[in-house]
Amino acid sequence: MITIASICNRAVAFTTRDTPIAAAAKLMRQGHIGSLVIVEQMNGGKRIPVGSIVTVDDILEVMSEELSELSRIVAREQAREASARK
């Protein structure tokens, strides 16, 4: 019988909750990592898993949404400035 232990990757990549999304995406892309375990560091250095990111695509989707919103804000401000100059 094949067990999970015989096929799992024991070199687990992890990051903390306060890691910027772009940094997590970069880590996953550069390391060819398919998932990151999100940990909370406790006193004494013990890492407690609190979540996971499964694919870099999930991160890129969030970043894309943020960039779209930022683009709308910039366009609105540029239009407001152009109107003020007239």
Image (tube, helix red, strand yellow):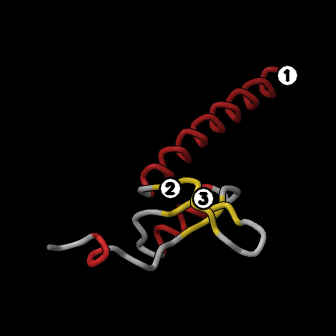
Residue 28 location, x and y as percent? Answer: 48, 67
- Check residue 22 in the rendering and tell me which mark sits there, or answer none: 3
Q: Nearer the viewer, mark 2 or mark 1?
A: 2
Residue type highlighted by circle 1: Ala
Residue type highlighted by circle 2: Ser
Q: Earlier in the sequence, mark 1 or mark 3?
A: 3
Residue 13 location, x and y as percent? Answer: 51, 72
1 and 3 marks in contact (CB < 8 Å) = no
Rendered residue at 57%/60% (across/down): 49
Q: CA distance from mark 2 to mark 3?
A: 15 Å
Q: Earlier in the sequence, mark 2 or mark 1?
A: 2
Rendered residue at 45%/49% (across/down): 58
Q: CA distance from mark 1 to mark 3?
A: 35 Å
In the image, residue 57 sits, relative to residue 24, either above or below, namely: above
Rendered residue at 40%/65% (across/down): 34
Residue 17 location, x and y as percent? Answer: 66, 56
- Check residue 84 in the rendering and tell me which mark sits there, or answer none: 1
Q: Nearer the viewer, mark 2 or mark 3?
A: 2
Residue type highlighted by circle 3: Ala
The residue singled out by tag 2 in the image is 52
